[in-house]
């Protein structure tokens, strides 16, 4: 095991280490993120043939129920595959960050090997978040039906938005907990609430920075390719297949390049919080130098 620098980090130091790790292990993180999304890219490229038939049928006014059903089914499959691939990439990236951070050997294959069936826990966490989000939306709609005063509705949505942001900041390290502490979805979310207490502001700033990076990347991508698409739509002609394929490839590149940054940051935040609140640095040092821990001790990773 190589020497590791385990110490409390300020927000600036955490962000600096995030980009340093990304730069120093660029191939590792790109490989981990690219592997799942290549599968999604192949599905999207294969779907271009069906989209061509769909657009041709729309232009000729020959839309059939089977065509509509196929489009819905295809979109659903792509969405499900995207969720699975995103969860797999995030989970493997967390293990890659953990190995690098703790001075262990990190490889693409080894990172995915550590995920295994733990992927189901990540899906479970996102399912819980989805249910909470849907419940919040239903509650907001219900309140909107009761409260018809515009000012009250506006204030309600502002308060709801702030609460939602705060909630997501508090569960920011739930996935690292699920991966590194062998915790189920509900326990991982609860532990994330414990670890992030008092640090929601820092996590919000990390989310804001990552969001800005993602938005800038998306704007650049759309400026490069959507101009030609809009021209084709205005002229009532089909978007060239080559343009569509290039757009999908560049979208894949954007996901692969930007995707690891947030996961690296939140993985480091997880360890930073454990160092600050649980003396993880001392635990790790003792585990690396002394005998194996007692059976009742909490696992380090």
Image (spheres, grey):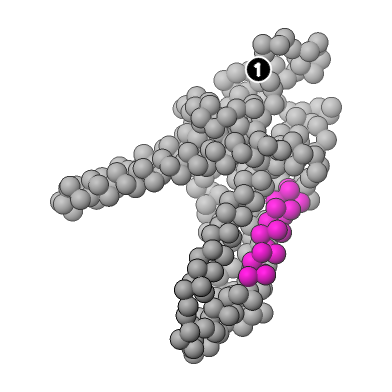
Percent position of residue 101, x then y = 73, 33
Instruction: Indicate yes or no whether the magenta region holds residue 83.
Output: no
Instruction: Classify mark 1: helix, strand or loop.
Output: loop
The main secondary structure of the magenta stretch is: helix
Percent position of residue 91, x then y = 66, 41
Instruction: Indicate yes or no whether the magenta region holds residue 37.
Output: yes
Q: Residue 250 vs residue 124: left or right?
A: right
Q: Which of these two is toward me, 68 or 7?
A: 68
Q: Residue 209 vs residue 153: left or right?
A: right
For the record, the magenta segment spans 29-47
Question: What's the residue at 76%, 51% (across, down)?
Answer: 31
Asked whether the viewer can see residue 233, the reply is no
Q: In which quarter of the image is residue 39?
A: bottom right
Q: Residue 290 vs residue 277: left or right?
A: right
Question: What's the residue at 63%, 23% (across, down)?
Answer: 275
Q: Which residue lies furthest to the left in this view?
A: 149
Pointer 1: residues within 10 angstroms few (<14), some, or many (20+)?
Answer: few
Q: Which residue lies under the disc numbered 1?
A: 298
Question: What's the residue at 62%, 46% (across, down)?
Answer: 87
Question: What's the residue at 69%, 22% (across, down)?
Answer: 300
Q: In this view, does 276 lie above or below 70?
A: above
Q: Which of these two is toward me, 264 or 144?
A: 144
Quadrant of the snapshot with the C terminus: top right
Quadrant of the snapshot with the N terminus: top right
Percent position of residue 132, x then y = 41, 40
């Amino acid at each position: 095991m190589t020497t590791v620098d385990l110490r409390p980090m300020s927000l600036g130091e955490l962000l600096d280490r995030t980009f340093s790790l990304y730069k120093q292990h660029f191939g590792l993180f790109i490989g981990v993120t690219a592997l799942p999304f290549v599968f999604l890219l192949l599905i999207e490229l294969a779907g271009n043939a069906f989209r061509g038939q769909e657009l041709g049928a729309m232009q000729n006014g020959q839309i059939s129920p089977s065509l509509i059903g196929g489009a819905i089914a295809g979109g659903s499959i792509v969405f499900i595959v995207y969720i699975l691939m995103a969860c797999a990439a995030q989970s493997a990236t967390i293990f890659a960050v953990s190995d690098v951070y703790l001075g262990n050997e990190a490889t693409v294959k080894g990172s995915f090997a550590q995920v295994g069936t733990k992927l189901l826990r990540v899906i479970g966490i996102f399912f819980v978040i989805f249910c909470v989000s849907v419940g919040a939306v239903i509650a907001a709609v219900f309140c909107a039906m009761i409260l018809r005063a515009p000012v009250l509705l506006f204030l309600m949505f502002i308060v709801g938005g702030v609460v939602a942001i705060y909630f997501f900041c508090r569960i920011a390290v739930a996935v690292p907990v699920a991966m590194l502490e062998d915790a189920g979805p509900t326990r991982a979310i609860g532990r994330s609430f414990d670890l992030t207490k008092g640090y929601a502001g820092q996590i919000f700033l990390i989310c804001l920075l990552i969001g800005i990076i993602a938005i800038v990347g998306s704007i650049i991508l759309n400026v490069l390719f959507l101009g030609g698409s809009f021209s084709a739509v205005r002229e009532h002609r089909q978007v060239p297949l080559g343009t569509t394929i290039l757009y999908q490839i560049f979208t894949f590149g954007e996901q692969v390049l930007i995707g690891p940054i947030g996961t690296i940051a939140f993985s480091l935040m997880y360890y930073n919080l454990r160092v600050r609140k649980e003396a993880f640095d001392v635990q790790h040092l003792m585990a690396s130098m002394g005998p194996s821990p007692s059976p009742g001790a909490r696992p380090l990773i």
